[in-house]
Image (spheres, rainbow, N blue to C red):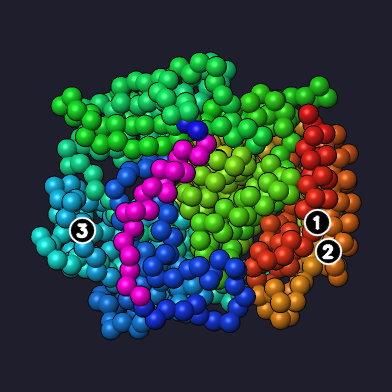
Amino acid sequence: MKRNSLVLILLATLACVPVFAANKWTPAGDHIKTRWASEVGPKNAHTEYPRPQMVRSSWQSLNGLWDYAISADLAVEMPAKAGEILVPFPLESALSGVAGSLSDDQALWYKRSFRVPSKWKGNDIILHFDAVDWECEVWLNGNKLGRHQGGYTAFEFNITPYLNKRGDQVLVLKVQDGTDNGLQPRGKQIMAPKGIWYTPVSGIWQSVWMEPVSPKAHITDYNVSSDIDAGYLTVIPEAEGADVVLVELLKDGVSVASAQVRSSQKAVLKVENPHLWSPDDPYLYGLRLSAIKDGKAVDSVQGYTAMRKISVVTDAAGHKRMALNNKILFQYGPLDQGWWPDGLYTAPTLAALEYDVRRTKDYGFNMIRKHIKVEPATWYYACDRLGVLVWQDMPCTDKYHGRDWWAQGKDVYDVGNSDQLSPEARENFVAEWKEIMAQLKKFQCIVVWVPFNEAWGQFDTKKVVDLTREIDPSRLINHASGGNWISGGVGDIIDSHYYPHPQMRLVDPTMVNVLGEYGGIGLPLEGHLWQPDKNWGYIKFKNSKEVTDKYVEYTEMLLPLVKDGCSAAVYTQTTDVEGEVNGLMTYDRAVDKLDPARVSAANRKVIDSLK
């Protein structure tokens, strides 16, 4: 498949998006906004196809203006509406049009009506929620569809039995989100934002949509892995009602390998002269999966994948190194929080979402550490398409307990058991981590899983690492980025954090050694600040040249660390975030605070030092 062919498929589906009536909607609050905020409105709130790896031509967005209300948490019915909210922007964001708040003893309600297109008659209708933070219950026409917990994962319902035969369908959601007063994974959200902790995110924050599928049989999911050494691609399709599933691999749009298997069985495809994916050449193969029933294809989805391998090798000096496609590659990228001044967790537009990935490449990086947040599928597709490696963090959970190792003034190993972490919080963490990995592991840009960060809610580390390995043995595991480390083969990576200049706190010759965070060089720029004061960086300067000079100086300091065994580095960070002013760009993405050309040259020098 040509790199742009899937883009064309996605754009073609926009014709299926309904037009919403004009309403009196405007962004709320007085915080800074990105330039894309002016493009957002009830008619065009994230109208792109939301699932790039399973594309169907027929679908309908349910984004746009919904009624909303807030009640006591024990309420069983939606009260009178308080106003309208723009989905998929979270309640607290400016682009929701509300910029409200939700406490742990309240519930947020959503309601809207929609109609099922008449041409979908005879099909099953699947209703999709791509992310709702944190717990929600869903009703259609007064019938309860179900309940979902987890703020970072998609879920769906077959709503066919509950549809009215004609006219409007009425959809209602009840959402509860305790943020840091709850026991759920929530990343850097906190009810009283300050310092490195940010504004809470509640409710719907990714797309809501529906699609028709054949009631006879349809594809529900698939997983894919590649073996570049043997030249094989393995696809495991999941389907309901199908006799078999036809799996086809496409190269530049032409089928080059195929197999028929039953649902949940392995389709092993021989790939002749595989075109390998890398940051310098992010080639994507196409995938087509068809559900076969009674000898006929009754459902088909378009997807994509890549041939690539991530592994650990030992170099000539005896250092453990990460290798991409069997070649040692220094992985260097920014800590990417994925926050927006106008949409918080939700980028204002798809172009905005992709902008950060493109600028990361422009700055000369080849990797992103996605920091304690999960992005929409379209973000990972951008990384796959543009060629950026991803370290995927698990959003941290509950209160931040565990050994404060840096306060002890020495390097330590610890079993990573926080005895103050509640059993319910542990259960929520494990359940959502399983869902996150299952949802994301098709994206070949992801090369490292990071279950824990800096001992924040860290617990049962070996068990969590073993679970991670069981679910996905194809990627490396950074078991505790800057947190409570465990020696003896738990995971693949030992990860030091050190601010501001790069320095390794710990070196373990039996594992890959990386510098998971450093930097944080601050530069507050008037007119681009979230708040007028209390802005901070680990160190602060007064102009772009000073910041760039210090950045280049720090990057030069990485070179001897690389020689001594450091195999990756993560600079803090892509953009300013609320009170943090240590980004490569301002929070509104309006200003590059460092000189991109100088930064790129310095970065490439470090990356190339291992080639």
Q: Magenta stretch: give its range.
A: 3-22
Q: Amino acid at mark 1?
A: Asp
Left or right: where does residue 332 sit relative to residue 6?
right
Q: Circles 2 and 1: CB distance less than 8 Å?
A: yes
Q: 543 or 555, which lies in front?
A: 543
Left or right: where does residue 380 sit relative to residue 173?
right
- Say which residue appears at 17% left-offset and 37% top-offset: 216
Circle 1: is it few (<14), some (14-19), or many (20+) Cα within 10 Å? some
Query: At which x and y percent is residue 362?
Result: 71, 48
- Say which residue appears at 66% left-offset and 23% top-offset: 326
Q: Which one is earlier in the sequence, the residue at label 3 or at label 2?
A: 3
Q: Residue furthest left?
A: 165
Provide the secondary structure element on which disc 3 rests.
loop
Q: Is residue 236 above or below residue 22?
A: above
Q: 18 or 457, which lies in front?
A: 18
Q: Is residue 305 above or below residue 370?
A: above
Q: Is residue 520 magenta?
A: no
Provide the secondary structure element on which disc 2 rests.
helix
Q: Which one is earlier in the sequence, the residue at label 2 or at label 1?
A: 2
Query: At which x and y percent is residue 377?
Result: 47, 49
| Quadrant housing residue 561 | top right
Q: What is the distance, in whole Å, between disc 1 and disc 3 at their CAs?
A: 51 Å
- Say which residue appears at 25% left-offset and 75% top-offset: 76
Question: Which residue is labeled 2 in the image?
Answer: 544
Q: What is the distance, in whole Å, between disc 2 and disc 1 at their CAs?
A: 7 Å
Q: Which mark is residue 595?
A: 1
Q: Is residue 600 above or below residue 573?
A: above
Q: Amino acid at mark 2?
A: Ser
Question: Which residue is labeled 3 in the image?
Answer: 116
Q: Which one is earlier in the sequence, the residue at label 1 or at label 3?
A: 3
Q: What is the distance, in whole Å, between disc 3 and disc 2 at their CAs?
A: 54 Å
Q: Is residue 373 above or below residue 114?
A: above
